[in-house]
Amino acid sequence: MKKYTNLILVGIIVILAVVLTGTLVFLRNQPPQSRATQPLVEIKAMEPDSARWGINFPNQYDGLLKTKTNNVATTYGGSSKFSHLTEDPRQVLLFAGYPFSKEYNDDRGHANALIDVQSIKRLNLTPGSPTETHATCYSCKSSNNPALWAEMGMEKFDATMFSEMTASGKLTQSIGCANCHEAGTMRLIVTNPALENALKAQGKDWKTFSRQEMRSLVCANCHVEDYFVGKEKLLTFPWAKGTNIEQIWEYYQTTLYDGKTFSDWTYPGSNTPMLKAQHPEYEMFTAGSTHFKAGVSCADCHMPYVREGAAKFSSHDVHSPLLNAEAACGQCHTDVKYVTGRVNEIQDQVYKTKLATENAIIDAITAIKAATAITSSDAALLDEARQMHRKSQFLWDFVSAENSMGFHNPEYILKILAESTDLARQSQMKAAQAAGDPTLLVTGIYEAMDPKPEPAK
Ligand code: HEC
Ligand code: HEC
Ligand code: HEC
Ligand code: HEC
C-alpha cells in the first residue's frame, strides 16, 4: 500500500512540475505589455488635427486645449493679450516707420496662435499693396505647416502672400501635436525646415541630440530669432556663426545682400538701417544660463510632470511657470516661495534697466535726426552714429522681444543692456560731433514728452 502512495505522490509532483513549466513557457512567449496605453487609432504622418492625436492621448490634448482660454496675467507676462505700445509708449518711437509701432501685443497660449496672427492689423494689408506680408509669418502658428512644407516645400510656402495663404483655407489648425511630435513613435522632432537648415549651417545634426536636449530644441522650432531672406522671404535663422548675441550680430554684419547688410526697415528721418529682433528665448536661455548649464530644459519649467488619477504626464498646458510654480519649480527647489520671489526681483531690475536703455536710444535717435537735417553735417561721423544706433537698438530688442523679462539668463541680459546703453550714448555724441552742435547732447527727451506717443495709425 505504502509503495502505491509513494508512486501516486511522485506522479502528482511530476504532473504539477510539467503544468508549472508549461505555464511559465506560455507566459514568457506572450508579447511584452506596452507601458503606454495601446493606440486606439492610427495617426498619419504630420496629421494636422490635434483632436485625432487626442483620441490616443487625451491628457496631453486636454492640456493643449486649456491654452486657448488661459488669460491670467503675471507682472511681466502671463496669458493676457496686453499691448506693449500702450504699456510702454517708448516703443512707439523706437519702432517708428515699422508696423510694430502700430500694434504689438504680448504672447498668449499655443491654441490662439493662428487667430492671433490673423487678427494683427499690420499683417492684414490690402492684397497687392507694396508692403504686403508673406505667408512666412504663418511659419510658427499652425500644425498644418509640417504637412504643407512637405507637400509644397518651404520656398514655395514662403513665396506665397499672407492674404493668399489665408484665403486658400489651407491653415485651419493652431499650434498642435504635429509641430513637436513624430506620429507613431511620438518622439520629439525638428519640424521647421529653417531650424534644420540653421543646425546644418553649424555642422549639427539634431538626430544625435539627447532626449534632454530635445526637450529644449523642440521649442526652437519657433521661439528663436529669425529673418526673411530675399524677394521670396525665405525663413532663416541667423545662426551660421553660433546662437549667442555676439555671433548673431556678427552674422548680420557680414552676410551681405547686393553688397549691403540686411535690414528690416529704414528709420524715418535718420536713415538708419534697422533690425527687428523676434522672441529669442532659445538663444538667450542656452547662452550659458545657470539653468541651462545645470542641464535644465524648457520643458522642465514650462511642461512639468503632473498627475491625474493614476496617470502621470507632461503638462501640455504651456504658460508662465509662475502660475503653477509648485509643479514647475518645486520638482528641484525646496523653497518655491523664495525662487519665485527671485524671479520678481530679477524682472523688476531688468525692466528698469531696459527703460533706461530705451531713453538713451530715443535721445540718440533725436540727435541723429537733427544732424541728418543739417546739410553741413560730417557724413562719415553721421554714418558712424547710425551704425551705433543700429547695433544699440538690436541689442536692446534682443532683450525686449525675449519673453521672460530677463529671467532666462539675468546676468547675460543685464550685460547686453549695459552695452546697448553705452552704444546709444556714444551714438548721440557722434551725431552731435557730426553736426558740430552741442545742443544735440540734450538727454531725457522721452521723460519730458507730454503727451506721450500713441500707437501709430
Ligand atoms: C528655470 C525655469 C525656466 C526654463 C528652463 C525656461 N523658462 Fe521660460 N520662463 C520662465 C519664467 C519664470 C518666466 C517668466 C514668466 C512670467 O513673467 O510670468 C518664463 C517666461 C517664458 C515665456 C513668456 C511667458 C509669458 O507668460 O508670457 C516664454 C515664451 C518662455 N518662457 C519660453 C521658454 C523657452 C522656449 C525656454 C527654453 C529655451 C524656456 N522658456 C526655459 C521659466 C523658465
Ligand atoms: C510645443 C511642443 C509640443 C506640442 C505642441 C505637443 N507636445 Fe507632447 N510633448 C512635448 C514635450 C516637450 C514632451 C516631453 C517629452 C520627453 O520628455 O521626452 C511631450 C510628451 C508627450 C507624450 C509622452 C508622455 C508625456 O506626457 O510625457 C505624449 C504621449 C504626448 N506628448 C502627446 C502629445 C499630443 C497628443 C499632442 C497634441 C494634442 C502633443 N503632445 C503636443 C511637446 C509637445
Ligand atoms: C510651432 C511653433 C511653436 C512651438 C514649437 C512652440 N511654441 Fe510656444 N508659442 C508659439 C507662439 C506663436 C506663441 C504665441 C501665441 C499667441 O500669442 O497667440 C507661443 C506662446 C508660448 C508661451 C506663452 C503662453 C502664454 O499663455 O502666455 C509659452 C510659455 C511658450 N510658448 C513656451 C513654449 C515652450 C516651452 C515650447 C517647447 C516645449 C514651445 N513654446 C514650443 C509658438 C511655438
Ligand atoms: C530641473 C531642475 C530645476 C527646475 C525645474 C528649476 N530649477 Fe532653478 N535651479 C536649478 C539648479 C540646478 C540651479 C543652480 C543652483 C543650485 O544648484 O541651486 C538653479 C538655480 C536657480 C536660481 C538661482 C539662479 C542663480 O543664478 O543663482 C533661481 C532664482 C531659480 N533656480 C529659480 C527657479 C524657478 C523660479 C523655477 C521654476 C520656474 C526653477 N528655478 C526651476 C534647477 C532647477
Image: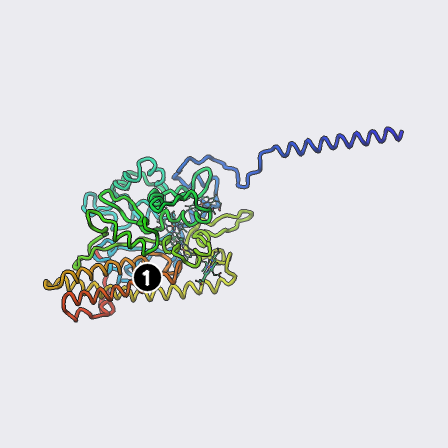
Mark 1 C-beta to ligand 4 under 8 Å? no
Q: Is residue 196 left or right of residue 380?
A: right
Question: Which of the 4 image quadrants contains residue 93?
Answer: bottom left
Relative side of 36 to 198, left or right: right
Q: Residue furthest left?
A: 375
Name the secondary structure under disc 1. Answer: helix
Question: Residue 145, how many percent across, how many down?
Answer: 34, 41
Q: Which residue is mark 1?
A: 416
Residue at (53%, 47%) from the top-left corner? 311
What is the tally of numbered marks visible in this picture?
Answer: 1
Residue 116 showing in the rendered view? no
**Quarter-wise, where is residue 35 in the image?**
top right
> x, y (%) of residue 447?
25, 69
Of the pair 353 and 419, the residue shown nearer to us = 419
How did the renderer colour the structure? rainbow
The quadrant the N terminus occupies is top right
Q: Indicate the amino acid at tag 1.
A: Ile
Q: Residue at x 42, y 51 (%)?
A: 318
Residue 90 left/right relative to 414: left
Give me the residue at 34% from left, 56% from top: 402
Left or right of 318, for residue 382: left
Q: Which quadrant, please, contains the C terminus?
A: bottom left
In the rendering, at what x and y percent does residue 232 appear? 24, 42
Badge 1: few (under 14), some or many (20 or more) residues near its Cα, within 10 Å?
A: many
- Is 384 rendered above or below residue 128? below
Seen from the viewer's position, the closer of residues 202 and 125 is 202
User: Residue 6's x, y, as percent?
Assistant: 84, 31
Q: Residue furthest right?
A: 1
Q: Is residue 224 above or below residue 290?
A: above
Residue 101 appears in the picture as rendered: yes
